[in-house]
Image: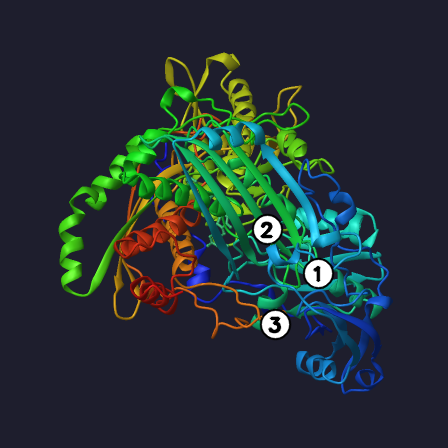
């Protein structure tokens, strides 16, 4: 009997423990003899350090050890994605050390550390460490940092330039601009964001003097990668000497992909203290200062178009702020995941993109939900609206005119995402953009909004509608391609799955991906139950421990379903194949004559000659009656390397009202049509879209990291950083089209980032549309009441 679990909206099985307070997060772990680590962070954004006196701290109550950078013999943290094609980047790599040895490059950089019996004692001792800082001028703005006379952060990076990277056809795009019927130019800022998972980061390091082995519990999306990077790159010890365990993770949104200094510090401290387990958990303020930030682009945009709205060229120069030092994959985000996808779902014949990666005295920037693709979508979706505005055309019609037609696939875009050095090529394999747009417009009542606009004016409001037709690259990625575009040390991106079938027919699936709230324990069990025809309750999903799971690259880039799910299908295929061979022997039939119907293995044409999956598993586990060439036990491991990424798309429509008196923006409706291919669990898909849409709307309306000119993080706590509240948002109206991905056996495309990629541009376009009667054609985010009020006032009074 086939169980109907695949595609069913099954409640997340992990929620039982999460919503009853029984999740086991990093800080819930308490080990015997555990001591606590605290890190002294620079109060200056840019400073030389002329000396550190730790003597007073050493004699504080409970203090076990005090370290500075000079005490720690480890290498600097690794940088794993040096942005293909960026000349000279190898010379400009400056990553953090475990504790700095060359001064502070941002407010919050680690300067010294204390280990004490209690967390409070460790923090108290930090207060008496004397650091002789020599403050230096700071720069926080990426564009200003490249200008002559700006403070310089690193000797090996003149003008603070990490790389000056280009992609596309500069001459062709310049020609398109020169010959265009209209050209629109705009400077747009994609402001810096601070990711806010509910659980902050933390580690527990434990060294075993008996075996000379290390274990680290870490709030990490990538335990297998961390084992490699910590051992081989940072600590210089064999990889098999470290075990990495990720317990339950309370959200990550990209922030827990990377190698952080605290991980190495916890391990170093444990060895120093002869094996005492060392715990470090960051405060929210530390999280804001020293866990990665996202976005932070300044972009100059030039669009060439014909009068009928056809876009003929897109030229972009972006200053990408990468912070004071580079995070693990920082340079890969504004290049591969931004510049190479700029043309979105459109056929734009000429595209040229230059990205200047820049050091500034700010926290490092790396992948935050969407990572490069929200920034790219923002650029191209603002471009579509700017063209429509310039030409007096309907923004929906401009999008329709420029969409890739259905016969364009496979499509290789001109910004060269899909052609990398080394011959690897990835193309947009499928899409059907216009039906998604049309459905979204219908659901939003797009063409009937004029009455609502007029009615809003009678109440002192401006009503605006904004579109965002996005195309996302995700499900990363073919290893050959990622290795080629990364120009790195051969990053691969395949995934793994192992299935063990116990004697009783119960199944354990272990996966190399690592959930942080996406419901993998549910969706992966759905896949296995469907494929093996067994009840979902018979399947348990395990992950997160490098000792017990097959190597996997982890969870990011909305890849777990498309890549890990496909590995799981491969593993179930192998299980079924062996079970079929066993059934043939048990039923004295030829293997070709065994058909699998749900969990029944039966002889074709003789439905009474049948063995169940459980009977077969038992026989294989006991091993009493196996054919000559059959190994006992039913298990299989599979590795899956996709041949392409997946390409979700859709159109989102935001409707806002702006109060003329106060500038306050109210998001009154949000309509989304997404195409994520087949769905394993539609309820989880909706949940992923809800979260993503709200994060993206948060950027448009409220969020923004603010630094003072001297590099102090003014939005340094949740009191100062405006996260969206549920009551600020309308009910989200979701709908779909379904274009299965041809790449993987499930036909799924990623959904984990889609909402965040689409929604910022939709909401921004809506606010700017609302303000268009005042002659406003662009405004930078976030559209706080104050910012919008100022824009309204200056538009009305002609004042800046
Ligand atoms: N799924 C499905 N049908 C599809 C696609 C996916 O049912 N067609 C299911 C999957 O099985 C999985 C979930 O939806 O349970 C998300 O799948 P996928 O799109 O493959 O994304 P990942 O599991 O790889 O998750 C990564 C993605 C990213 S990159 C960020 S950032 C993000 C996100 O997921 N961070 C999150 N969603 C998050 N959700 C929570 N709660 N917390 C985070 O930190």
Point out which mark residue 128 bears: none
Task: Look at the image and tell me whether residue 502 can be seen.
Answer: no
Specify whether 277 is left or right of 349.
right
Residue at the spot x=49%, y=47% of the render? 375
Q: Nearer the viewer, residue 113 or 231?
A: 113
- In space, the residues marked 1 and 2 are separated at their CA atoms by 19 Å
| Residue contact at pointers 1 and 2, CB within 8 angstroms | no
Q: Quadrant of residue 323?
A: bottom right
Q: Which residue is mark 2?
A: 320
- In space, the residues marked 3 and 1 are separated at their CA atoms by 21 Å
Specify whether 705 is left or right of 127.
left
Tell me the SS state at disc 2. strand
- Mark 2: few/some/many CA within 10 Å (<14, 14-19, 20+): many
| Residue contact at pointers 3 and 1, CB within 8 angstroms | no
Q: Nearer the viewer, residue 378 or 564?
A: 378
Q: Which residue is mark 1?
A: 149
For residue 561, above or below residue 722: above
Tell me the SS state at disc 1. loop
- Mark 1: few/some/many CA within 10 Å (<14, 14-19, 20+): few
Specify whether 101 is left or right of 554.
right
Residue at the spot x=52%, y=22% of the render? 580
Q: Nearer the viewer, residue 297 or 492?
A: 297
The picture places residue 460, in percent across and down from the top left corner, at: 19, 65
Residue at the spot x=43%, y=65% of the render? 723
Colouring rule applied to residues: rainbow
Point out the tag, 1 or 2, that comes first from the N-terminus.
1
Position of the C terminus, as image quadrant, is bottom left
Which mark is in front, 1 or 2?
1
Q: Which residue is mark 3?
A: 712
Point out the tag, 3 or 1, that comes first from the N-terminus.
1
């Amino acid at each position: 009997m086939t169980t109907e679990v695949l595609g069913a909206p099954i409640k997340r099985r992990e929620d039982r423990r999460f919503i009853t307070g029984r999740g086991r997060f990093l800080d819930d772990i308490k080990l015997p003899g555990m001591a606590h680590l605290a890190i002294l962070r620079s109060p200056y954004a840019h400073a030389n350090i002329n000396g550190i006196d730790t003597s007073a701290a050493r004699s504080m109550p409970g203090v076990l050890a005090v370290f500075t950078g000079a005490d720690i013999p480890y290498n600097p943290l690794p940088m794993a994605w040096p942005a293909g094609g960026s000349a000279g980047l190898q010379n400009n790599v400056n990553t953090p050390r475990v504790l700095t040895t060359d001064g502070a490059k941002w407010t919050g950089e680690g300067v010294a550390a204390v280990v004490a019996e209690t967390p409070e004692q460790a923090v108290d001792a930090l207060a008496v460490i004397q650091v002789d800082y020599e403050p230096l001028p700071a720069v926080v703005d990426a564009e200003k940092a490249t200008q002559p006379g700006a403070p310089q952060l690193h000797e090996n990076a003149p003008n603070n330039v990490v790389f000056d990277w280009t992609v596309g056809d500069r001459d062709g795009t310049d020609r398109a601009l020169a010959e265009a019927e209209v050209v629109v130019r705009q400077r747009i800022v994609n402001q810096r964001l601070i990711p806010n998972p509910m659980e902050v980061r933390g580690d527990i390091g434990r060294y075993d003097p008996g075996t000379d082995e290390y274990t680290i519990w870490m709030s990490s999306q990538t335990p297998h990668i961390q084992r490699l990077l910590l051992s081989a790159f940072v600590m210089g010890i064999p990889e098999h000497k470290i075990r990495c365990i990720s317990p339950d993770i309370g959200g990550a949104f990209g922030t827990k992909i990377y190698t952080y200094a605290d991980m190495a510090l916890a391990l170093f401290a444990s060895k120093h203290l002869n094996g005492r387990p060392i715990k470090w958990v960051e405060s929210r303020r530390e999280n804001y200062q020293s866990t990665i930030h996202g976005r932070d682009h300044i972009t100059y945009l030039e669009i060439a178009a014909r009068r009928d709205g056809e876009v003929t060229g897109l030229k972009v120069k972006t200053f990408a702020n990468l912070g004071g030092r580079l995070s693990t994959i920082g340079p890969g985000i504004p290049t591969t995941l931004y510049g190479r996808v700029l043309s979105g779902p459109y056929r734009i014949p000429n595209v040229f993109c230059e990205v200047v990666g820049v050091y500034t005295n700010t926290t490092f920037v790396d992948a935050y939900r969407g990572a490069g693709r929200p920034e790219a979508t923002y650029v191209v979706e603002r471009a579509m609206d700017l063209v429509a505005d310039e030409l007096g055309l309907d923004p929906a019609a401009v999008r329709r005119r420029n969409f890739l037609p259905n016969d364009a696939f496979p499509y290789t875009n001109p910004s060269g995402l899909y052609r990398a050095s080394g011959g690897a090529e990835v193309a947009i394999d499928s899409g059907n953009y216009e039906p998604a747009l049309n459905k979204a417009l219908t659901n939003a009542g797009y063409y009937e909004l004029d009455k609502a606009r007029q009615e809003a004016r009678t109440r002192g409001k401006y009503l605006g509608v904004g579109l965002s037709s996005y195309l996302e690259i995700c499900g990363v990625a073919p290893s050959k391609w990622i290795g080629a575009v990364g120009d790195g040390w051969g990053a691969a991106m395949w995934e793994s799955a192992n299935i063990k079938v116990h004697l009783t027919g119960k199944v354990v699936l272990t996966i190399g991906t690592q959930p942080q709230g996406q419901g993998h324990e549910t969706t992966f069990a759905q896949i296995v139950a469907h494929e093996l025809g067994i009840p979902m309750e018979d399947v348990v999903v395990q992950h997160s421990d490098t000792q017990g799971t097959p190597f996997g690259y982890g969870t990011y880039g909305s890849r777990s379903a498309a890549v890990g799910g496909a590995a799981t299908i491969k593993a179930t295929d192998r299980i079924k194949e062996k079970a079929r061979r066993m059934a043939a022997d048990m039923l004295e039939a030829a293997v070709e004559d065994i058909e699998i119907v749900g969990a029944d293995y039966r002889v074709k044409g003789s439905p009474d000659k049948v063995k169940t999956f459980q009977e077969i598993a038992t026989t294989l586990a006991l091993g009493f009656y196996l054919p000559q060439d059959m190994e006992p036990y039913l298990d299989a491991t599979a590795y899956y390397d996709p041949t392409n990424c997946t390409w979700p798309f859709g159109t989102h429509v935001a409707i806002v009202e702006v109060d003329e008196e106060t500038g306050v923006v109210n998001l009154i409706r949000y309509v989304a049509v997404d195409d994520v291919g087949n769905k394993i669990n539609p309820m989880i898909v909706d949940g992923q879209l809800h979260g993503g849409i709200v994060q993206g709307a948060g950027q448009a309306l409220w969020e923004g990291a603010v630094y003072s000119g001297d590099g102090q993080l003014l939005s340094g706590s949740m009191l100062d950083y405006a996260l969206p509240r549920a009551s600020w948002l309308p009910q989200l109206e979701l709908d779909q089209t379904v274009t299965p991905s041809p790449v993987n056996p499930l036909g799924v495309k990623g959904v984990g980032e889609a909402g965040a990629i689409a929604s910022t541009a939709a909401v921004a376009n809506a606010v700017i549309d609302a303000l268009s009667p005042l002659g406003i054609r662009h405004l930078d985010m976030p559209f706080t009441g104050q910012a919008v009020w100022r824009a309204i006032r200056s538009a009305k009074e002609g004042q800046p």
